[in-house]
Image (tube, helix red, strand yellow):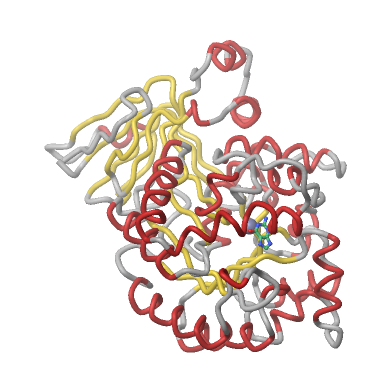
Amino acid sequence: MSRLFHRGQILHFLGDPSQGAEESYEYFPDGGLLIDDGKVIAVDHASVLLSSLPRNTEIREHPSALLVPGFIDTHIHYPQMDIIGAHGEQLLEWLDKYVFPTEAQFGDFAHAQAVAKRFLAELLRNGTTTALVFGTVHPESVDAFFGEAEALNLRMIAGKVMMDRNAPEFLRDTAASSYTQSKALIERWHGKGRLRYAVTPRFAPTSTPEQLKAAGRLLREHPGVYLHTHMSENLNEIAWVEELFPHLDHYLHSYDDAGLLGRRSVFAHCVHLSEAEWQRMAETQSNIAFCPTSNLFLGSGLFPLAKAESCGVHAGLGTDIGAGTSFSLLETMDEAYKVQQLQGHSLTPFKSFYLATLGGARALDLEAQLGNFLPGKEADFLVLDLAATPLLKQRMAHCENLFETLFVLSTLGDDRCIRETWIMGDCKYQRDTAADCTMQ
Ligand code: GUN
Ligand code: ZN
């Protein structure tokens, strides 16, 4: 049975709430979502759709739940899942002490595959249906990851790290080998099913200008692939980039020089951009992954979301596991709110849920496929349990409108709220059985 009618409360976004909250979303208190062959056919009030439901349509009721599009994580490292919560360091020391030793293991395909399996299970448990993912320097890490993502029919974007300096010998490639290996991976995986490739220089300090140029060449030779890196996360990192590229005006220039900016380019963090960098991000339609749990955990700083908005730069939410401290985009929304509070801004829950869905899809240039329930979109969606815990249930009873319901969900919610995760119309995670619930 591929045609299913899901009935429950439904919310999705049509635009950015910053440009008018009321018109930015559709909410159906008793809604229906009709799905056929993995795609959305229609979303509306249940009563409207029920009157003309095609014969042989199975109906699923979702009581005390809210259906939303799958969450999109715009920046995460799968090889770092086993070092979440590593104590005591800021970025550069944390990389040396914890990240590089753990990433060294991913030349072993069997190890990479085992971690990728656990990682994807954890994403689904947290309602994340699409992510932009760092591998390690080893091509095996990407083969393993894409193999597991393909088996689950997930829309995932990933790439091999390019890193030819300022890293341990055992994790270094060269400008030439990183080009050849990335090219082979692009040919093997980019556009295979729902998978896409991201050219992935780790960050400017660990790539020579020659390697950044090789990244630019890969982008030019393979239109449609992504660029994924880090930028301006930490003040010591920025000072280091100034030393390494003394002839350039600013950090962004190191990437711009190599032709790495554009609408399929995603820069994680961007906590400390200069005015010139903001302008150039906007001009080139480059995107930012805002990673609040990571920025707080590493003491990196407070991301100025309002500045991104005013410059018209697309931002999505990222967990940045393993510097980030939660896989849950609900918990990430909670921290995003606090980061904005500390800057005198009140992030609305509409904006938070937008960022985790349509905003993320826009930041990844996937709006044509994902992000909301418009007809033809891929049917990746979540059934959020509004009474997942005694406290949540009690608190929800005091919510008087959708704004409050969403805000409480983002404040108290976590993986326990993910009752079901559906991928292309198939249920791939069901909390209460903690097992796959394949529909065929
Ligand atoms: N900058 C360069 N590499 C990394 C990484 O692995 N994590 C984070 N948070 N920042 C980085
Ligand atoms: Zn990162």
Total number of numbered labels?
Answer: 0
Quadrant placement of the C terminus: top left
Residue 253's x, y, as percent? Answer: 76, 80
Q: Which residue is drawn at 39% across and 75% down?
A: 185
With respect to residue 435, does 292 lie above or below?
A: below
Q: Which residue is drawn at 43% across and 20% down?
A: 64
> Can the viewer see residue 264?
no
Residue 392's x, y, as percent? Answer: 57, 17
362 and 257: which is toward the camera: 257
Residue 293's x, y, as percent? Answer: 69, 43
Q: Which quarter of the figure has residue 309?
A: bottom right
Quadrant of the displayed image that contains ligand 2: bottom right
Quadrant placement of the N terminus: top left
Q: Residue furthest left?
A: 56
Residue 232's x, y, as percent? Answer: 77, 64
With respect to residue 320, does 174 lie above or below?
A: below
| Residue 298 relative to residue 15: left or right | right
With respect to residue 337, does 253 lie above or below?
A: below
46 and 265: which is toward the camera: 265
Q: Which residue is drawn at 61% across and 59% down?
A: 100
Q: Which residue is drawn at 37% across and 61% down?
A: 109
With respect to residue 259, does 27 lie above or below?
A: above
115 and 251: which is toward the camera: 115
| Residue 174 relative to residue 254: left or right | left
| Residue 360 relative to residue 335: left or right | left
Q: Which residue lies furthest to the front in this view?
A: 169
352 and 241: which is toward the camera: 241
> Can the viewer see residue 117?
yes
